[in-house]
Image: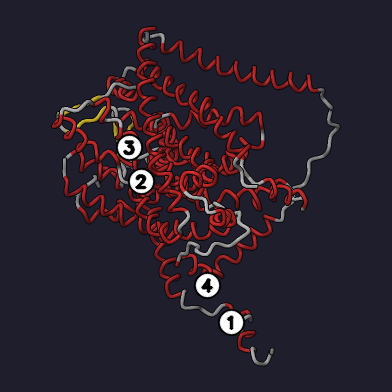
Amino acid sequence: MHVLHGGRDGLSSPLARLAPSRWDVVALPLVLGLLALLVFGGHEVAQPLSQLERTPITLDPWTLPYYALRTTLRMMAALGASLLFTLIYAPLAVKSQRAGQILIPALDILQSVPVLTYLSFTVTFFLGLFPGQVVGAELASIFAIFTSQAWNMTFSFYQSLRTVPSDLEEVCTGYHLSTWQRFWRLEVPFAVPGLVWNMMMSMSGGWFFVVAAEAVTVGSTTITLPGVGAYLALAIEQRDLGAIGWVILTMLGVIILYDQLLFRPLVAWADRFRADTVQAEERPTSWVLTMVERSTLFRTLGRPAGGAARATLRWRLPALPKLPTPRFSPRAIRMGDFVWQGALALMALYVAAHGIQFMATGVTWGDVGHVVLLGLATMVRVVVLIALAAVIWVPIGVMVGMRPRLAAVVQPLAQFLAAFPSNLFFPVAVAVIVHWTLNPDIWLSPLMILGTQWYILFNVVAGAQAYPVDLRDVIANLRLRGWKKWRDALLPGVFPHLVTGAITASGGAWNASIVAEAVSWGDTHLQARGLGAYIAQMTTEADFPRLVLGNVVMVCFVVLFNRLVWRPLYGYAERRLRVS
């Protein structure tokens, strides 16, 4: 046998393993091209701020590839920061009960704060780190995009960590895996499918904010960074429909590229981590993933990193010296929890007191009651829109997620629709409402959900893709049909992911209300009664006490709704709907 297969055995020699394959013909130009683009982008970031004044934004279509490169690099940097934040923040919130009492409410607050608020507070800091350099403005822009990407990824990872199958946890305990090993060998792989789809949503959702993120304002000075968002803002300002068309085509091309080069391979790779005992007949594929696995170049480049990763996974971090641990009575433990929660309450009261003191300089009790009523109006819009979006997208998401071939077609289309700047619909909405004399309180409402409904779709698709194949076979064998099939099998299977998508969509809708409840096109201005329109008006008038009041009321509504509605649903999903 060894003689007959001597040629094949020869392939295992070191020299034969270094022989290039046909995939290297594609891999080498691709790697060199990506490196060249990274070097070029890094060189542009290192320029002085005066360079931006010498090269102002132009609507010449030939500049769009360069602008697309700069925007894509910012969004990729923000996505990397969001992933790092997710891998640190969510485990802390899950592993420590007391840390979770701070981190999860903080996450509710962070997702409800408008992106422009982050930008206004961080621009001076980042520009101060690198005075006179473009990199300071770039970091401020990247941070603004980060705040539009990180929260839904963190919620997805948090939900996955809370619903890890108990039988897999028992296996880890049986093998005596350390906390570090359990995290990388069980918890991260289990969360990967949902996290990948939320990364796609984060990347697409970031396009909505690039218009604001690429215009960095310091005092009366605005620093406009080269990018697709700045190009789009100028096109809207000049009402250049041709330029807007070029932006749409550029976005479509960029989305197709990073779908093929990044997200399609990630989806195919993440499919290996499904909690299945039976292999699916259809599985997602990617030519890039096949190239990476079969290319000699990638194998050679990846060998040191793979060895380091395997060594890292074998780590057993040295245990801290064991100190005598006092045994507390249940009463003492309850007292400790009471003291901890009391300390948190005092901190909250301290912050609230300073906020009230500032607002008291320009806010009356009548203003407070008025703003609360506006918040109730916006809340009604958010609840109705989220419910309608769930009714529409849950069946579609389940159908797409359970059919890999359909998902391969729908994935780039969904990314493009999610990335499409919904503010381009505002002129159409204004024209229709004015022409038909419609009620802005009703017909401006759909603008709030245009960009955030995709959180529900992407999360439901992730949940459907993670649905175990053996349970699908059980459904087929029992011949479940119609509503019984959805009630007893499909909805429970995707429910945790649906809750995650609804939470992030809800937070996004509250944010979007600031621009959706008060829209303009030319000299025509329409405004719906709601908290978002109030905040937009106070921002324009620079009425900071009332602006703070509007933001505080919005944060309170989001946090209370999460506490009273979404968190109980999370708990129900953890107790009753985890795969075991």
Q: Which residue is mark 3?
A: 212
Quadrant in which the N terminus appears: bottom right
Q: Position of residue 579 (x, y in %)?
A: 62, 47
* Of marks 4 and 2, the one in the foreground: 2
Q: Which residue is mark 4?
A: 294
Q: Which residue carries the number 1 mark?
A: 16
Specify which label sits upstream in the sequence, 4 or 2.
Answer: 4
What colour scheme was applied to this rendering of the protein? secondary structure
Q: Secondary structure at mark 3?
A: helix
Q: What is the spatial separation of the Cα atoms under label 2 and label 1, in whole angstroms?
A: 46 Å
SS at circle 4: helix
- What residue did someone put label 2 on? 418
The CA distance from mark 1 to mark 4 is 14 Å
Q: CA distance from mark 4 to mark 2?
A: 33 Å
Q: Eyeballing the image, is 192 above or below 109? A: below
Question: Is tag 3's residue or tag 4's residue first in the polypeptide sequence?
Answer: 3
Q: Say which of 436 and 367 sits in front.
A: 436
Say which residue appears at 59% left-offset and 34% top-offset.
Answer: 572
- Crowding near pointer 4: few (<14 within 10 Å), some, many (20+)? some
| Mark 4: amino acid | Arg
Marks 2/3: CA distance?
17 Å
Residue 301 in sight: yes
Work out how far the residue at label 1 is from the one at label 3, CA to CA, in angstroms. Answer: 53 Å
- Return the x and y of residue 15 as percentages of the image width and height: 60, 81
